[in-house]
Amino acid sequence: MKFKLFLTCLFLTFSGVLLNLNLNHKDYYTNLLKEKTENIILGDSTPRGRILDRNGKVLVDNEGILNIVYHKDVGVTTEEELKIAGCLSSFVEEVDLSEKDLKNYYLATNSNGKNLITEEEWRLWDERKLTNEDINKLKWERITEDLITYSPEEQKIIFLYIKMQEGYSYQDKFLFQNVSDDFVAEILELEIPSLSVKVTSKRSYPYGDTLKSIFGSIGSIPEERLSEFLENGYFISDTVGVSGLERVYEKELSGKKAKYFLNSDNTLTLLEEEIPGKDITLNIDIDVQLELEKAMKEEMELAHEKPSAKYFKEAYAFIGNPMTGGIVAMTGLRRMDNGEYQDITITALTSSYAMGSVVKGASSTVGYLSGGITVGKRVLDSCVKLYSEPSKCSYTSLGYVDDITALRTSSNYFQFLTAIQSTGQNYSYNMKFDVTEKDFARYRDIFSSYGLGNLTEIDYPNEQTGMKGTTIAGDLLLNFAIGQYDTYTPISLLQYINTIANYGNRYALRIKKEESNVFLNQIQMDASYYDRITEGLYQVFHGGTASSYVSAALNAVGKTGTSETFYDSDQDGVVDTPVINSTVVFYYPRENPKYSMVVVAPYITDISSYNYPFTRNISLKMTNYLPL
């Protein structure tokens, strides 16, 4: 019985392996079989597709480069290859040889190291008392340093010879890459039949470093992804997208290789032409992008002159299409101590900050859905005093406010009352405000539905969600409600304001232009509540805290924010200096929104000094520039 059970298990295991090979690896092994039995091979990587902005302007292009390649003839000897390498050695400027390279060269030029094995050891090998592995190990160990000590001229020959052995015998071996016309002419004058000129391409960037970190880079296949690429028809030597958009859209950009029949003399007969990679079009408008970068640098320079902004080193700004999630312009800049600027745009997806009152649209949503807000009810702005905690107040006394005017004036007190009432409790002076993890989850779930503390699903790798506080306490729930507890990434603010513009419909952010936007979720709240939120946020820009940020004629809707936080002023790993983050989010016009915008200025000022109006100035400059 046990033996039958064993056979059954063995059969099922074997069947599972066969099924896995058939379903998941069929193409790989089919191609491998063809390569081994039909002498069908693929050419080199094709020219990659270009990357264009939304108006068709080329952002990433291909630039032709000249290379000298070696094609191995059938029957060529080591001595003949060394002679070719000797003829070319004077063209080599630098060599990079490992100990492994030198030992392999020694074996190749010394009868595969036969002299390193004793007669007795060969006898044991004949008697199968030593294996091939044993013999090879003995050879490798006996190649001493003095045996592989070569002159600089010899090393150049070795360097070329090693390159001539790379890859399959039928493949072209790149000996010199990205060379000049004069260099090519000198090589061709040598009249070496096995050498030829091959034109390949490298990426070029018409707009310099602008968005280069977002475009990403191409290079050798990363070791951790090697099996994935090999199973999809790539060679180990292929160039692929390794980061950024080059990686995300590798399939479209890479194209299809030419197919050849390998003849018996190592020559190739073309069977199928190569198909170049497809161009991809982004939502980015390069003119808007350049204007945004210009404005950011101008304002960062002006802020740098203010003593209060001594910790202000970096800033972020985004312009999007709120209806589709498309990103029109995006930038993150860090001002270096030498006055130069570093592109840190990709950190907008990974770095996170306390964002302040910009989140109050989401906080009000919690209030409406939990019953924490009574529509139109007016309260006198004041302070909240909890047991054993200092009073928490708005930035100034704001008089009577309701759910709309509380947004316009940015009343903290109103949001504190809302947070308390969302738990089913009513505020009283010096009350013990007990909360649970469920109370925080109520807020976090709604914030997440806006994209705050959640992945925006942007088409870019390695996005992070920000930091969640772990302590459960009543005063911290109040801080959460005004954006001063959990931290959020700058990019997530763009999705947040877009979701408000779409009355609770959240769409993925997209750098690449798509035929349709990608829907993620809907916040189930009556449109009448969104009417009140958007009215309050409209008033922020029309008589409220952002009245000077955008021309009133543009009918902007949004929110400003400041958050008290701490900065590591002496770079000792301890945040020790109180500072303020400044933010603004908005879309416009109110009806049929065309643009959304986010500006984040971390550590713009110390806690007691003048606050340079960075977010306001960027908002003004860009909305004056952008056409409607």
Image: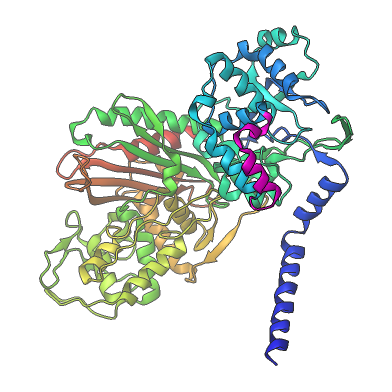
The quadrant in which residue 358 appears is bottom left
Viewer-closest of 269 and 201:
269
The quadrant in which residue 300 appears is top left
Viewer-closest of 299 and 404:
299
User: The C terminus is located in which quarter?
Assistant: top right
**Residue placed at 22% from the left, 71% from the top?**
474
Specify whether 498 is left or right of 333: right
**Residue placed at 30% from the left, 58% from the top?**
483
Viewer-closest of 361 and 330:
330
Q: Position of residue 392 (x, y in %)?
A: 16, 62
Confirm whether the magenta stretch covers residue 538. no
Query: Which range is magenta?
Result: 111-130
The quadrant in which residue 86 appears is top right
Instruction: Note whether 372 is above or below 380 in the view shown.
Output: below
Specify whether 83 is left or right of 487: right
**Most common SS among magenta residues:** helix
Instruction: Note whether 207 is above or below 418 in the view shown.
Output: above
Instruction: Note whether 207 is above or below 140 in the view shown.
Output: above
Q: Position of residue 306 (x, y in %)?
A: 21, 30
Q: Position of residue 462 (x, y in %)?
A: 49, 51
The answer to whether residue 67 is visible is: yes
Confirm whether the magenta stretch covers residue 112. yes
Viewer-closest of 532 and 572:
572
Q: Position of residue 486 (x, y in %)?
A: 32, 60
The answer to whether residue 197 is visible is: no
Colour basis: rainbow
